[in-house]
Structures are given as C-alpha cells and as structure tokens.
Amino acid sequence: MTESPVPTVDAVPPVDAVPLVDYLVLGEDPHLTAHQCTSCGARFFDRRNACANCGANQFDTVAISTSGVVRTITIVACAAPGVPVPFVAAVIDCDGTSVRGNIINCPPDPEHVTTGMAVRLATFVVGQDGQGTDAIGFGFEPINS
Amino acid sequence: MASDDIWILGIAMTKFGKYPELDLVDLAAQATTAALDDGGVTMAQMGIIAAGNLMNANAGLGQQLQKQVGQTGIPVYNVANACATGATALRTVIMALKAGEAEMGLAVGVEKLAGAGLLSGGSRKDDGDEWTPRGRYGAVAPIDGRIGTDTMPGVFAQIGMEYGHRYGGTSFELFARISEKNHAHSTLNPFAAYQKAMSLEQIMGDLMIAYPNTRPMCSANCDGAAAAVLVTGATLRTLSSEQQRRAVKVAASVLTTDPWDEACQILPDVNTLTRNAARQAYEQAGIGPEDLDLVELHDCFATAELVHYDNLMLCEQGGAVDFFESGAPFRDGRLPVNVSGGLESKGHPIAATGIANVWEIAHHLRGEAGDRQIEGARVGLAHVIGLGSACGIHILEASAA
C-alpha cells in the first residue's frame, strides 16, 4: 500500500482510544467478535488451542450480533473495593451467541431490568490512562420500543 | 455384603464455626481421630489417605496430618477440586479400594474461612498508568464489574434467575423462602455454624449481596473439618457385628465435569454436569430419585438450591418451583432437603463440605441424628458442586444388618 485512502471524518475511530478487551471492535459500528470453530461453529471470546466442543483446531473470526435478549441478570450490591455498585451483570442472547456484559443506561433495579428484555450493544469510556488514551468498554442498553 | 462394595465404617465432623486458636492440621486431626474412633479402627489400619484443602492446596495437608496423628508411610493424595474437594477426597479413596490397592482408607477435608468475605471478585487490581492488553481477553484494565461479575453470589444469582426466565414462577420472595427453610432446619443441628431461625422479613431485609441473594441466602464462611474411614465389603465382613451394623453402604460415588455448552464460557453451567452425575449415580445405585429419604444438596446460595431440585431429578424438568411449593423439601415433607441447615446456615468450609454432607446422611441412616432424625431413613443422596466445574454425588444406604 503506497497511499492511504482519504478517510471520511466520522468513520475514523479516535486514535486515542483502545477497546477494554480485544473482542470489542471500535469504529463506526462497534461490535463484538468471536473465534468460531470452522468445524462445528462453536464460538469463543478467548483463544483456544482446539475447540472445546469438537476438538477441531481451525477458527474464523466472526462478528456477533449487536442486539439481543436478556437471559439472566443479577444486581451486584457487594463487590471488590473500587467497583462501583450497584450494577447489573447479565447474560445476553445475541442471536444464539451468549454474551456476558452489564446492563447500562438503565436504573439498576428489578423494576427496570428484567429477563426477556430487548437490548443492544452500547459503548462507554472506562477511563483515561496517563498517556491521554481512553479505554472504551461495552454494555447493553434497553431498546425502548 | 458383597466383597467389592464400599462402606463407610467411621465418619465425623467438627462443629462448623470459628476456631481462631486451631489451625488446619488441628481441625483435620480432630475430625480424623473422631472418624477413626467412630469406626473402631486406628491409623495403623489405613492403607491410603486422601486429604482435601482448597485455600492452601500446596501445603501438603495429608503429610502434615500424618505427622499429627500417625506416620505410617502409606500413600497420601492431596486433592483440591473447588467446592467438590471433599467429595473428591472420598472418591479418591473409594477408587483405591475398588482398584484393590487398599482395604481401608481415610478421606479428610478441612478449611479455615471464618471472617472471609467474597472468595472470588473480592479484590480488583488498579487500572495501570498505560492501557496495555493483557491476559486471555487482551484486557487493558480489570474487567470484573465492567463486563459482568466474578463474585460467586452474583454468578449463582444469575443461575437461579436464568431458571426463572426459562420456566417461570421464581421471585425474590421464593428464593428467600428456600433460605428460610434451611435456617429453620439448622435450629435442630448442634453442628451448624448458625442455628438461628430467620423470618422471611429478616432474610429479605438483610444486606443485599447480589440480587436476589441477600447475606443469609449465601453460604456461611466458617472453619471446619470432616473425615471418613472407608472399607471394602470383604474387610468389613471380618470386623465386629456392631461395626457391620453401623456401616453405611456407598451405593454410588460419581464425579463429573461440565461438558461443553454454548454459554458455559459466559456463565458456568452447573446444571448439565449435576444432571449427568445424578443419572450415573441413580444407575450405579440401582434406584431412582423416588427412592430417596433425604437429600443434602449444594445450596451455596438460595438460588442454587432451586436449580438442583431439578438437576438431581427430585422433580420433573422445569418443576422445581412446584416441588418447593408442595412442601416436599421441608423436613416434614415428602423428600426433605438440607435438614442439616445447608451451607447457608450449617456453613461451608469448602473442602470439608463434601464429607460433612455425607456425615449428615450417614447419621440419619444409622438412626443417630437425634432431634433432627428423619424417621426410618434408609437411602440418602449427598451432592456438591464446585465451579470450574466439578460435581460429586454420593448415594448412601443403611446397612441391612
């Protein structure tokens, strides 16, 4: 590549931002990715030497749906020092792939957070390091239909 | 008694609670000595020791115990397997006996946890000065609390809430009533760390840990030890009629891990491995859940007890709420569950738990459970599960003698 294409301004991820985890892809359409077994389709967010389901050892990278349904929750009131509480920890069924994440942009109480509710991926700034770089995390927010 | 059957000859537990003056070896030695006395045997007759301890798993507890009660040169297996550590110690001795490598052996489990807080997710590293990807997720900062929770009360809360999402019928109050049952049961157990009945209002109004689990709905961190002497049927036949009468048959001994499941990388699947273990255990014992007289199951949290009614097949699939509502798991019900008070009130010194619940069942089968005796109990099941995961199930039968 000799010359970079001229990027449109709002399509460029800020260079001073990094994802909280390597399976979060930032940019215009933030989304999660997974390693998918080419043999059986099992998906893993971390690296595996062989598929835990079928033992095959080839993986593709696939994008995970950014919307889903809350399958279970808890509202954590006691956590490690430094962890702001309460917060809602949840498992989201994103079109058949289970994803762990917090429910955000929503009051953390059983009246507002229920299993079965529809949610979508949202990002937020975790914090800024000493170099001025933001870490970007993800959670899931209610889809108000 | 068939020669290749395995029997519990002696079994003992310390009262669970706080022992600031005693160390792990003291507690393990107390339980060991009491189990040997209970069986009418000595260390000289043991052919193998399996010693369980989780929080100091590299300490060589078994050898330390030998120095405290008898160094006879026999093989020691120090085992650690999360909350299934005690059951793993039992299972290790049982396998050695079944393999013909010993005729009698000692399984012991001990833990000191009094005053411990959250055992997982109890501390989090500070964010560094520069975001640098680390670990299996390339995380630039700690993720506990940012991407879900590592705390056990929170993990098991999700497990119970997921059951409710799938089958319906659960509520904060329902889970609290399960806890109310176990705290009521504990009032009859002098070996329980806590023997106080708690009202539903007290339980629901107590400190919230991870909704819907409040503090009394969580297993109690405490100190304790339990030990068992196991013997082959062939050797038991050579012992006294009194020893044979009090021996309790191990009708099934099973240990499983979790097979892959789509969501198990996200939230531990405690259901499939428990169901698999239960199926194997019933098959080994040649009985079904309808033949059980009592069950001690792993109520590490009130939300966990509910799902294990189902996993142990004490009810139809999806029927755990109805099973509880029917009154079945209360001590005067059709199939009493956790008459010891369970982990929520008896306490959960991790490595001791998987032997202490067998002790509870054995005492009922011997007719020695005192005020909390389940009359006429002949068959019981003891279950533990440790995250990671490992599930241990033992089915016990009263001696026919």
Image (cartoon, coloured by chain):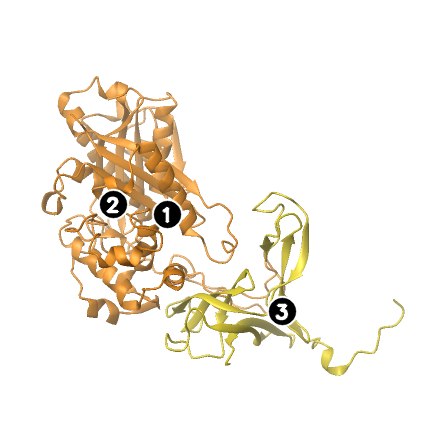
Of residue B119 and residue B172, the one placed in the foreground of this image is: B172
Q: Is residue A73 left or right of residue B133?
A: left
SS category of the residue bearing label 2: strand
Percent of width and height locating residue B383: 31, 44
The kind of residue tagged 1 is Ile
Q: In which quadrant is the N terminus of chain B drawn? A: top left
The residue that label 2 is drawn on is B295
Q: Is residue A71 visible?
A: yes
The kind of residue tagged 3 is His
Of residue B210 and residue B308, the one placed in the foreground of this image is: B308
Mark toward the viewer: 1 or 3: 3
Q: In the image, what residue occupies the spot 15% across and 27% down?
A: B245
Q: Residues within 10 Å of mark 1 (few under 14, many from 20)?
A: many
Residue that extends furthest to the left in the rendered view of this protein: B371
Q: Residues within 10 Å of mark 3 (few under 14, many from 20)?
A: some
The residue that label 3 is drawn on is A31
SS category of the residue bearing label 1: strand
The chain containing the residue under callout 1 comes to B
Q: Colour of chain A?
A: yellow
Q: Colour of chain B?
A: orange
Classify residue B104 by image quadrant: top left
Verify CB contact (< 8 Å) between mark 2 and mark 1.
Answer: no
Give the answer, above or below, for where B345 lies relative to B355: below
Q: Residues within 10 Å of mark 2 (few under 14, many from 20)?
A: many
Q: Is residue B80 left or right of residue B106?
A: right
Classify residue B373 by image quadrant: top left
The residue that label 1 is drawn on is B385
Q: Is residue B104 left or right of residue B191?
A: right
